[in-house]
Every structure is written in C-alpha cells, then in structure tokens.
Amino acid sequence: MKELSTAKLQQLSDEDVMEQLQAGVVQAFDIIVQRYKDRLHNFLYRYTHNHEDCEDLVQETFLRVYRSRHSYERIAKLSTWMYTIALNLAKTMYKKKQRMSLISIHADDSDPDDREFEITDTALLQDDALHIKFSMEHLEKALLELNDDFREAVVLRDIQQLSYEEIAEITDTAMGTVKSRINRGRQQLQEIIGEYVKSETY
C-alpha cells in the first residue's frame, strides 16, 4: 500500500485512516487522536466528572486503540469501536474504586423512541452566555445524580449524538433497553434540573 501524505490522510474517512494505521502508516494514528481526543474527553468527563480520571482514561483508550489496531474490522464504525473501549475502561476503573452500582433496567415499550431533549431550561435567553453557563452547570450536576446506566445512555445519545444502534453495540444492551434508559434518563434530568431552578428562585 502506497503511503499517503498527512494532507491526504486527513481527507479520508475514519475507517480508511484506521486501515492506513493497520498497514503501518504511523501518521494515521496522530490523525485518529486529533479527531477523537476532544470527543472522548467530553464523553469520559461527563461519565466520571473527574479531570484526572478522565485524562487517564483518554490516554489509556488511545493506547488500547493502537495496541488493538489489528483486531478492528470495518464491519463496525471506528467511533463505535473506540467508544466501546473507552466505556469498558471507565467501568473497569469505577469497579476498582468501588463507585459503580449496576442496576438492571427493563425495556418500557410505551416510551417514545425519538423524543427531543433540551439540556437548557425554557428561560434561556439567546446569546446570554452567563445563563448558558448556569444551565450547563445544572446539567453537569444533574447527570451525576443519574445511575450509571441512565447517564451513559443519555451522554452517548444527546451529547455524543450516537444512534440507538451504536449505543446498543457499545453498551452490549438490547435496543429496547437502550431506548428505555435514554427516555427515563431524560425525564429524570428534566425533573432534577427543574428542582435546581426552583431552589435558586426562592
């Protein structure tokens, strides 16, 4: 395989870049890191809410990606494969720290499949940076109050904007359970954020 320039590599899809890495093009790994470091940090921070843990997990994820590069197959999107690695590492870390509680959630087919979720309250004023800051702080605090299953499902769907199929594959969970966790997590977030807003009003 002819080695491509960095500029050419940057024009390739994630999966094609990974193929180049598998073929021995080291620069391809740098491009994968550039594309995913912020996305992984964003996901893992909302999952752990700890900067030090988050940084460690991002670094370990990329290390695992490089070490396991030849095990990746194009039947899955590269993003799905990487999020699976990151989530498994986060769960392992939490188990070691005895901070993780595993809760079984049953699918609720009566929940809507694709309900929009607003992360800010209805009082948000356009271009009001301070209000946005407070709203995001409410969201961060509220996410921490959800159990791990709900939090990871909501973060993957509404913040990382992954499809239901990708989330089911990443979490190794049935589609109905994924949809139930997302909808119940959204409902709980809205209730929690509403309580925050009420408590600051009085």
Image (cartoon, helix red, strand yellow):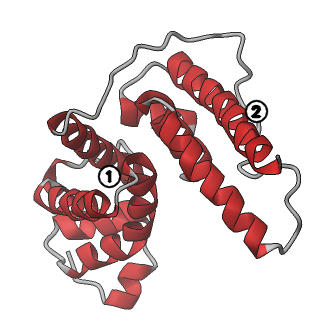
Does residue 195 appear left or right of residue 86 in this picture?
Answer: right
25 shown above or below 126: below
Image quadrant holding the N terminus, namely: bottom left
Distance from the alpha carbon under mark 2 to that under mark 1: 26 Å
Q: How packed is label 2: few (under 14 Cα within 10 Å), some, or many (20 or more)? A: few
Q: Residue at x 46, y 38 (%)?
A: 152
Residue 166 in the image, given as x and y percentages of width and height: 47, 38
Q: Residue at x 88, y 69 (%)?
A: 126
**For residue 71, which numbered disc appears in the image?**
none
Residue 32 in the image, given as x and y percentages of width and height: 33, 70
Q: Which residue is mark 1?
A: 82
Residue 149 in the image, given as x and y percentages of width and height: 44, 29
Does residue 135 appear left or right of residue 43 in this picture?
Answer: right
Residue 82 in the image, given as x and y percentages of width and height: 32, 52
28 shown above or below 137: below
Q: Is residue 99 visible?
A: yes
Does residue 126 appear left or right of residue 83 in this picture?
Answer: right
Q: Residue at x 18, y 59 (%)?
A: 60
Q: Amino acid at mark 2?
A: Arg
**For residue 115, which numbered disc appears in the image?**
2
Q: Describe the element under mark 1 as helix, strand or loop.
A: helix
36 shown above or below 201: below
Q: Nearer the viewer, residue 108 or 67?
A: 108
Q: Describe the element under mark 2 as helix, strand or loop.
A: loop
Q: What is the number of callouts on the image? A: 2
In front: label 2 or label 1: 2
Q: Residue at x 39, y 17 (%)?
A: 103
